[in-house]
Image (cartoon, rainbow, N blue to C red):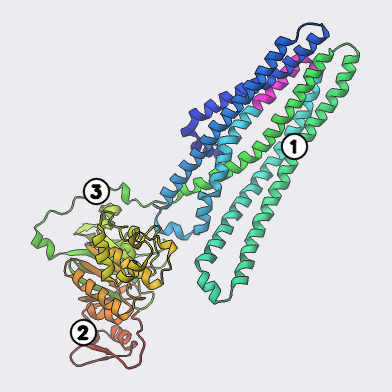
Amino acid sequence: MPNLRLLWSFVRPHRRTLLLGLLLGLLATAATLATPLVTKWVLDGLADSRSIAPAVVVLSALLVAGSGVQALQWILLGRMGERVVRDARVSMIRRLLRLKLGEYGARTNGELVTRVTSDTVLLREAAASSLTQLVNGAIGLVGALAMMALLDGVLFAVTLGSLTVVAALVAALMPRLAKAQRSAQESVGRLGAAVDGALRAIRTVKSARAEERESVRIEAEADTSARHSVRAVHIEAGVWSATMAGVQLAILLILAIGAVRVDSGALPVSSLIAFLLYAFQLLDPATELAQEFARLQSGVTAAARIAELQKLELEDGHARPAVPRPTRPAAAIADEHVLAFEDVTARHTPDGPPVLDGVSFAVPRRGHTAIVGPSGAGKTTVFSLMLEFLYPDSGLLRLDGIPLDAWPAYESRRRIAYVEQDTPLLPGSLADNLRYLRPEASDAELWAALDAVGLTRRAEALPDGLDTVLADAAVSGGERQRVALARAFVTDPEILLLDEATAQLDGLTEAAVQAFVRDRAERAAVVTIAHRLSTVVEADRIVVLEQGRVRAIGTHADLLTADPLYRDMVTALRVATTPDGTDEPAQSEEPSAVG
């Protein structure tokens, strides 16, 4: 019952359409139920030498009306089913894009995609077809039995006994069918996840010559899915066979007992023929009920899997009341810190160790702040807290002096542009990607941003320029990173977060980007996770993290003198520090990374 209520929750917005479909089904069923009686009318007319023309007209009218009503019902409910699927998919997509970041880690993308695609198709079948056909079948079955009871009580008792045995068998098989179908749908989700993971890492797969291993692994998931599906098919076949056998047994008994009753004069031939017609009519609703129960079970299982997404935790930024920006004198605001960490402790999981432990530092409203440290020091976690991908266990983050959790997430993020280290391209054209954070940007601003990252010639060479769909163009990793940087340039943010955004750039392009960062730092806050010496040297201040704590804060020159860890990281780059405080790479050494 709870799962049926879940299914009904998806259908409820369309209940008027469903009700109309049910009424049309009742009309079609009524026409079908009337046909054997009209046939009896024809036979009785022939036996009594009366005109059968009225009966033939009625029979023809029932046929035409029943066919037309069924066609209308099919169209109406088919359209309703597509709307149910559309609403469910839109609801899931909206929710999936608003989940807390940690919720994505517990499920693969392939599994989530399966719920949006294949599970909703099963939901449509259950909502548009199964519910209605079950009602129509039940009405047809009850109606036919009622008419059979009116025609002959003895034959009705025989029929009812046969159907009771069938119902008991079907009821015994249904729980097993439900379990098998749920296992089959879950295995399809795992199969989708396996394929998605292999394709995402296809370069690694090919470079490791692991195509065969991945094929075997995915084939194992496909075999598991097939095994569960075959089990469901076997059980469904048992339900189908039991139903058909039961109805056919009833027809054989009706023929045998009916012949005896006709021979004794207890039953007219026309009544036996009408009774047999109703018995044959039982085939459709009985087998339909068995099929639709199985299909409904798949839909109920799909509804339960879809509803599981409703339990996942959403970001609450949209629910928080908006906080007005501080109305303080411009001179005072200019001297303040735009972001501040105050004794912040954070964990990735509630029972995990702290990734940041008592971190305190501030980001000036203007200037370039670099964050460095060994791997695992907590650098990326700092960005996650700034963007509210993660929330602190204790301590406080402030934006413009106001606790960050008092700002709606969409408002605080509106002021930030974030460039990831491994930046994906977004669906759409080059222009769509560049305008992603600022849709109203002009073409001139887009070209200026492309020029800043050295992509002008590449963009001009694309088949449709700014309107080229990037999925159709060969774009290298470095070009992807530059597109992301250009997108941030177009945005003109108050706070620019760069997660080693120059890692894949050549020297000339990196110089252009560094020039932009210097210009941007004069008007806004730039925070970088730094792995390259050029970024460290350019920063106005450097925050050194170690094991989740702030170890030191200062300029490059100050830290070289005062902090052994920072000096060791710079030494690892084979850098010779000249007496005047500048740094020169050692001869014939490739650039390496800080942290």
| Res 351 visible | no
Magenta segment boundaries in residue numbering? 138-153
Q: Is residue 58 magenta?
A: no
**Quarter of the image with the N terminus in it:** top right
Hey, what amino acid is under mark 1? Answer: Leu
Q: Circles 1 and 3: CB distance less than 8 Å?
A: no
What residue does disc 3 label?
322
What amino acid does circle 3 point to?
Answer: Ala
Instruction: Report the quarter where the C terminus lies.
Output: bottom left
Describe residue 77's horizontal placement relative to residue 489 as left or right.
right
Going from N to C along the chain, the mark reached first, 1 or 2, is: 1
Picture residue at 15% right of the left edge, 64% below the top: 336
**Can you identify the residue that label 2 sits on?**
557
- Of residues 448 and 308, which is closer to you in this image? 448
Q: Is residue 420 above or below residue 110?
A: below
Task: Answer with mark 1 or mark 3, whichever residue precedes in sequence.
Answer: 1
| Residue at 23%, 72% in the rendered image | 517
Residue 586 in the image, given as x and y percentages of width and height: 31, 92
